[in-house]
Structure formats: C-alpha cells, structure tokens
C-alpha cells in the first residue's frame, strides 16, 4: 500500500475510534432509558431487550419538563446575548486598537477559566443571597455571562482579526462612527464567527451544572437541576435518570446537529481560510 | 478649496521614530505625490493626514484649521487603499453610496450621485455586482468611485495602482490625471514608483527614512536635485555618479578632474569648494553622447535595445559602471569600446556631503505647473 494511503487509513480508523469513544456514553444512556430499572443494572449488560417507554412516562409525571426546558432556553440565550453584547466592543477594541498589554490581558482573561469554580462558590453564594438573586433566572444569566465572557471575547477577537483592517478604515474615511463601523461593517463581515461563538456559548450554558445546582432550587432551575433531581437520596434509578438525561440533552443535541456546519466552519475559520 | 499644511509632523511607534519632522504645504487643487523607497514612511504620513494614525507631534492644518484631534470620519477626506478595501458584503452601488448613506442623504439623491460617478468611471453596468465578481481594474474603479461620490475636500491615494498589471497601470495613470483635471480637487498620492510621480504630480515630495529630501515640481527635481539621493531616485535609468576632484573653483564654473585625468568645467555657483576637494559628478544616461573623442572611454558590457533608444551598460577603464542612453539605431554591440562626450551644462556636481552645488542656470521649465485647466465650479 502507498504510504500516503496507509496514513489516511490509520487516520480514518483513529478518527472513528475517537468518535465512537465520545459517542458511546450518549448511545448507552439513550439505550438505558428504554430499559426497565432491573435490566438497566443487569450484569452483564443487556444489549437486546424489549424497549419500554415506562421511564419517560414516570419522568413526565414526576417533574414539569417544559418548565425546566424553558428555563434552560431563556438562561442560555439570555446569557449568550449579554456576553456577546459585552464582548463585541471589547474584542473590537482589542483586535483593531491593541495596546502593549492587550495580549497579556487576553491570556489573563482565559487563565481565569483555569480556576476551579468552587473557589468562589461561597462569595458568590453570599452575594446572591444578599441581592436576592438565588433561584432567579437573571441571577444565573449574570453568572453564565461572566463565566463565558473570556471564551466569547477570545473567539470574537480571533474572528475580528480575520477582517481586513483596511475595510474598517475605509468605512471610517467614509464617515462611519465607531458604532456604525461595528454594526454595518464588522458584524456582517464576521457573521459566521459570531454565530459559531454564540452557538458554543449556548451549548456551554445549557450543559452547565455546578452553578445551576448550587444557585437554583425550583423557580429558575434549568434542565441540569431537572436531571439531578432523579438521582434521589433513596438510591439511583439508572433507567429513569437516563430518560431524564436524554430528554434534557435532546434539544441541544438537535440544535447542535442542525448547526454543525456553521459550528465547524466557525471553529476552523482561521485555519482553513 | 483645500490647502494642507504640515508643521514639523512627527510619528513615533514606541521608541522608534518613523517620521522625523515633516514640513510641507500642499496647495489647493494640487496633485501632490509622496515618493520614496519602501519603508520610508509615505503611508504613515498619508495615514496621519487621513486621521487613521495618531500624530505624535506637530500640527496638521487643513484650510486653516488644526485637525490633529478630529476623527477621520469628520475630516471630510476620501482615501483609496492599495487593497481597494471594498465592502465585500455590499454591491458596487452600495459601496459607492455608503458615505452618502452615513451622511443621511436620501435614497434618490444617492442613486443619482452614484450613477453620475459610475458614468465617469464607466461602471454603469456593474452597479449590482458584488466586489468579488469584479476584476482588479474594476475594483480599482469602484474604490475611486467611492471616493469621488462624496466630493471630499482632499483625495488620498495609497499606492492605488500597485496591484494592477503594467498596461492597466498606465491606463489608470492617465485616467487619474484626467480625473484630477475634471474634479479640480486637491489630491495626495503615495507611490514608490518615480515614473508615476513624474507623470502625475504637480508637486513631488521625495521621502527617505522619515524626512523630506526635497519637494518641488517634477522638472525641478529632475534638473535641480538637492542631493545625491534625489538625483539617484528621480529619473530612469538612474543618474550615473563619478568621483572627481576640484582643480579650480571660480564664480560661474568649477573645474574638476575625473579619475582618468579628464578635465571638465561645470557651470555651478561658487560655493565652499576649494581646489583639491572631493566631489561627485552626476550625469544622466540621456545626457551622454557617443563621440569620436570625449572625456570617458569604456567597454560596453550589456546592450539593452528598447527600439526607440538603446541603453549601453559600460565599464570604464577604472571599473566604474555607467549607463549610457544612445539612439535606437546605433549598431554598437557588446565588448565594443566607446568614447563618451559629456555636456557640462547637463552635469550635476555634489560636494563631499552629498549636497548638490547649485547650478548657474535655472532650467526654464523647472517651475512649470500642471494645474487643472478647468476652473473649479
Ligand atoms: N504599526 C506600526 N508599528 C511599528 N512600526 C511601524 C508601524 N507601521 C509602520 N511602521 C514602520 O514605519 C516605517 C514606515 O512605514 P510605511 O509608512 O508603511 O512605509 P512606506 O509606505 O513608505 O513603505 C517602516 O519602517 C515600518 O516598519
Ligand atoms: Mg506604504
């Protein structure tokens, strides 16, 4: 075999293995959600069984899925909008008017993501308690905005860097004020990048569990709390937990699937242009 | 009416000074060309006038008003970029009408003004296209169209023709000159190409490493270069330089001896030069003549025949290379020996510091200006 062809083959196999490895837990979870509780914990695990919708029915009876899903949606979209609103001017300034410390600032912003969230749990909890933000949607929106801001700024910065400076300068010469320059030139030109940034932010918000579990109870609780409520103290019910998880991730999975082309294009924007 | 005055303009990038104090005034309706080697600061100077680059020190005055701190969007200048910098997401018509849209001009008026500019630039049929559907030359026109639509106080061009092929470049050069005539506007044009400078400018500003070496009409720079740099930069092929020694200096003529012993009396003003001083003789290729006898003798190494004229790359006996322009019809071939006669009146003399020693006669065309024939309406 030609070495180039062999290399390609190896790469393909490795790719499929990695994809399988990542996808397997999701596959197993969906499978488990159609089993009875007994089948779910059977050893060795059963691959063939009579599927049942029983878990889904129980899950629906026990909790108001729509309420949680709506919270997830409002909070994810809200936090993403707010983060984008703050990040666009920041990334614009950093990309087109960099100072001596811009690079350091960007790195520092990203480095805050390396700090474990528990480290600030107590102060944030106290702040939330004193401002009445516990179990409110706006409270979570604020936390998620701050949580994702470094990544959103960083990504927008990268995409803005791809926009030729000349074009914005031409706009400035044509009489565009900074706001018009951003709105009428920069945003339309970096739309794919902005879209993929927003998508990533929505996904990150949707999947966030630490803050939502600690800062919400019922009113503002998103789907992550919904899932957690099925790991009851009286023991784990794997099948019901799987059913709850499946319907919790279903919307974002479908959303991600539909926008995957956009997402990949955005994430590889700089690399393949 | 737009005049521009630069008063000791400086630009620093951190600790590096790239513009080192430029004084300049550009008259109304003048076509002013900044020319110089790459990296000398032409773009930086232009961008400071545009407002795209902050001015570190000095005053920039347009029509009597100091505008250092006025943002580019409020200076009322238009700029054409080397990369064209068209808005890729807008049609040609929207590109050209963008400034009017920002200024709040009504849709009908916008359409009329864009149509007018499109007519001047022969873009009528392309108005609905996107920039990526245009050729380089067409994009260039759109970029120029975008500038003229808004009737700016001053047009700024940063190497606008560099990305075009040679024949298109010549065509656009002529068109820009015509446009200058038609619009009767003040224009500043940056190029590294001295031919563009010579052909289009009313005033050429020669820059080198952030300073103005000389500013003047094309023929002033050609006939009265202030120093060796300008003498070598203006004119093509470049001026020949030969080392020489002063043997006698009087008012009206300085006699020099070349390396091969030949003597020549050059009509320049009496300066500080004394007998024995080292000087440099400058002679343009087009001012040398092949003759039976003359001051210089050399061997032809390369013959470049352009048809109408022939360039002889000649090695003198002392090894110096010389470019001689001769008639297109001469039969001279490689390795032939030629004798060159110099015309003292066409020779330039530079002192040991590289500064030109002033010539006795000022060239009659040195002050010729090519101002717009039409009056500004
Ligand atoms: N943003 C910048 N930061 C630092 N140095 C710069 C910057 N822009 C230009 N320079 C330097 O300034 C000098 C002049 O640049 P420029 O005006 O672009 O030259 P030109 O247009 O004549 O080729 C160059 O030496 C260049 O390296
Ligand atoms: Mg330049």
Image: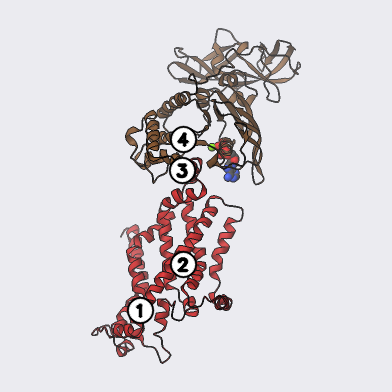
Chain colours: A red, B brown
Q: Which residue carries the number 1 mark?
A: A65
Residue B17 falls in which quadrant of the image?
Answer: top right
For label 3, count other residues whose C-alpha is less than 10 Å away and answer few (under 14), some (14-19) or many (20+): some
State whether label 2 is within 8 Å of ligand 1: no
Q: Are labels 3 and 1 assigned to the same chain?
A: no
Q: Nearer the viewer, residue B202 or B39?
A: B202
Q: How far apart are the two marked residues, 3 and 1, measured between alpha carbons?
A: 49 Å
**C-alpha span from label 4 to label 2:** 42 Å
Secondary structure at badge 2 equals helix
Asked if the residue under mark 4 is in contact with the one under mark 1, i.e. CB atoms within 8 Å, the reply is no
Instruction: Tell me which corner region of the image, top left, top right, bottom left or bottom right, holds residue A54.
Output: bottom left
Mark earlier in primary sequence (4, 3)? 3
Are discs 4 and 3 located on one and the same chain?
Answer: yes
Q: Chain of mark 2?
A: A
Q: Is residue B179 left or right of residue B69?
A: left
Local crowd size for mark 4, using a 10 Å CA cut-off: few (<14), some (14–19), many (≥20): many
Label drawn at residue A79: 2
Q: Nearer the viewer, residue A7 or B254?
A: B254
Circle 3: element type = helix
Q: CA distance from mark 2 to mark 3?
A: 32 Å
Q: Are marks 2 and 3 on the same chain?
A: no
Question: What is the x, y in percent for residue A146?
Answer: 52, 67
Question: The N terminus of chain A appears in which quarter of the rendering?
Answer: bottom left
| Residue, disc 4 | B150
Nearest to the eye among marks 4 and 2: give it.
4
Q: Is residue B130 visible?
A: yes
Of all chains, the one bearing label 4 is: B
User: Which-is-in-front pick, marks 3 and 1?
Assistant: 3
Badge 2: residue crowd in 10 Å (few <14, some 14–19, many ≥20): many
Q: Residue furthest left?
A: A50
Q: At numbered mark 4, what does the secondary structure look like: helix, strand or loop?
A: loop
């Amino acid at each position: 075999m030609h070495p180039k062809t062999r290399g390609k083959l190896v790469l393909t196999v490795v790719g499929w293995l990695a994809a399988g490895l990542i996808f397997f837990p999701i596959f197993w979870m969906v499978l488990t959600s159609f089993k009875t509780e007994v089948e779910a914990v059977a050893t060795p695990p059963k691959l063939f069984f009579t599927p049942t919708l029983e878990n889904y029915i129980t899950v629906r009876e026990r909790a108001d899925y729509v309420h949680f899903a709506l919270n997830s949606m409002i909070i994810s979209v809200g936090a993403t909008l707010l983060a984008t609103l703050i990040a666009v001017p920041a990334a614009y300034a950093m990309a087109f008017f960099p100072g001596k410390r811009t690079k350091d600032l960007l790195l520092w912003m990203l480095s805050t993501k390396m700090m474990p969230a528990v480290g600030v749990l107590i102060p944030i909890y106290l702040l939330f308690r004193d401002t009445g933000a516990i179990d409110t949607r706006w409270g979570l929106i604020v936390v998620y905005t701050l949580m994702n801001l470094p990544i959103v700024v960083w990504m927008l910065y990268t995409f803005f860097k791809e926009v030729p400076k000349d074009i914005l300068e031409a706009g400035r010469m044509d009489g565009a004020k900074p706001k018009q320059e951003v709105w009428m030139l920069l945003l339309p030109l970096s739309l794919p990048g902005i879209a993929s940034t927003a998508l990533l932010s929505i996904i990150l918000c949707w999947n966030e569990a630490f803050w939502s579990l600690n800062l919400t109870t019922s009113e503002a609780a998103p789907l992550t709390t919904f899932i957690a409520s099925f790991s009851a103290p009286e023991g784990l019910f794997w099948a019901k937990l799987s059913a709850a998880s499946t319907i919790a991730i279903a919307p974002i999975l479908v959303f991600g699937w539909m926008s995957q082309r956009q997402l990949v294009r955005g994430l590889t924007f700089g690399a393949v242009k | 009416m737009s005049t521009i005055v630069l008063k000791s303009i400086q630009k620093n990038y951190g600790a590096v000074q790239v513009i080192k104090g430029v004084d300049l005034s550009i008259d109304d309706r003048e076509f002013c060309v900044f020319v110089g080697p790459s990296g000398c600061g032409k773009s930086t100077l232009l961008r400071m006038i545009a407002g795209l680059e902050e001015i570190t020190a000095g005053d920039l005055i347009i029509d009597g008003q100091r505008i250092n701190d006025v943002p580019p969007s409020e200076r009322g200048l238009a700029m054409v970029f080397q990369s064209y910098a068209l808005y890729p997401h807008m049609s040609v018509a929207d590109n050209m009408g963008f400034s009017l849209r920002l200024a709040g001009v009504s849709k009908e008026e916008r359409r009329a003004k864009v149509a007018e500019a499109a007519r001047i630039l022969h873009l009528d049929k392309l108005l609905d296209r996107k920039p990526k559907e245009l050729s380089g030359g067409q994009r260039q026109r759109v970029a120029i169209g975008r500038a003229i639509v808004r009737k700016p106080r001053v047009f700024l061009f940063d190497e606008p023709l560099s990305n075009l092929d040679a024949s298109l470049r010549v065509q656009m050069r002529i068109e820009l000159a015509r446009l200058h005539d038609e619009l009767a506007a003040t224009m500043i044009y940056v190029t590294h190409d001295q031919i563009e400078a010579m052909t289009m400018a009313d005033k050429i500003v020669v820059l080198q490493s952030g300073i103005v070496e000389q500013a003047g009409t094309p023929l002033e720079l050609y006939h009265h270069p202030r120093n060796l740099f300008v003498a070598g930069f203006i004119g093509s092929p470049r001026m020949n330089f030969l080392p020489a020694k002063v043997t006698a200096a009087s008012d009206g003529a300085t006699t020099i001896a070349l390396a091969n012993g030949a003597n020549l009396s050059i009509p320049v003003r009496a300066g500080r030069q004394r007998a024995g001083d080292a000087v440099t003789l400058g002679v343009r290729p087009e001012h040398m003549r092949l003759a039976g006898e003359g001051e210089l003798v050399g061997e032809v190494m390369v013959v470049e025949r352009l048809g109408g004229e022939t360039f002889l790359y000649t090695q003198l006996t002392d090894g110096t290379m010389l470019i001689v322009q001769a008639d297109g019809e001469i039969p001279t071939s490689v390795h032939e020996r030629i004798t060159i006669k110099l015309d003292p009146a066409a020779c330039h003399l530079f002192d040991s510091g590289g500064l030109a020693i002033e010539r006795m006669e000022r060239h009659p065309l040195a002050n010729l200006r090519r101002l717009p024939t039409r009056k500004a309406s």
